[in-house]
Image: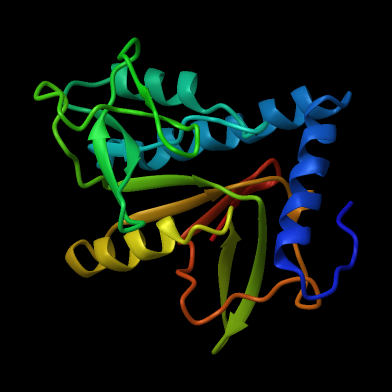
Amino acid sequence: MVDMHGNSLKTLRLDLLEQRKAFASGQSYLEVQDSLIAKLNAFLANEGSSLHSIALYWPIQQEIDLRPTLLAWSHNAPNRKLALPVARPDKHLDFYEWLDGDVLIPSKHGVPEPNPQNSFRPAINPDCILIPCVGWSNSNINGKTHYWRLGYGGGYFDRTLAQLRKTNPNLICIGVGFDWQKLDDAQWAAQTHDEPLDLLLTESGLLR
């Protein structure tokens, strides 16, 4: 579905977002969404018991909505917590506990965020972070496959992951995307500042 592009990363992102908009209104979307969520449920069933906190995202621009799935995970056992990101002026993210029904505040990018001043919702360093992809790619480095995320261009997640991984080397970062969003090297290649994903979740499965 993705066409070849020149060097314009902005154009590539805009094209991918337009294609996601069209895909979300297409006939196959619900089937693909259900398949992706089933793969997430399988991950949570197999490995979710070792996680105490998961950071998710508030879906915008036709991103797949994982909130009901993760709310169910958090309700299935005590002491499980969910968190949402808050963008800082220095283009890092902090994560704050989120409960369904909380009043959220639109960020300057229009993304609903928790109120950092709410003393009932403390900051959390999550065990696992789910990140939506605008596009994604993979590469082979020393015989090992690495997965990479193309995001919206702000660099928030790359800066945040680089910092969090220093203090929590066991952090699990999962990119969330669709099979058709895969990019080849002629379209986009990860740069030195890009942080790799630990896992990539698509409708085909969980890629490690």
Q: Quick check: 132 above or below 150? A: above
| Residue pictured at 86% horizontal, 68% vertical | 5
In front: 49, or 7?
7
Q: Quick check: 67 above or below 191? A: above
| Residue pictured at 28% horizontal, 25% vertical | 98
| Residue pictured at 41% horizontal, 39% vertical | 46
Q: Is residue 25 left or right of residue 84?
A: right
In front: 28, or 190?
190
Residue extending furthest left? 119
Q: Quadrant of residue 119?
A: top left
Residue 71, position as x, y percentages in the image: 38, 20
Q: Is residue 71 left or right of residue 14?
A: left
Q: Quadrant of residue 90?
A: bottom left
Residue 174, position as x, y percentages in the image: 47, 51
| Residue pictured at 47% horizontal, 40% vertical | 43
In front: 145, or 131?
131
Q: Quick check: 193 above or below 157? A: below
Q: Is residue 157 left or right of residue 205?
A: left
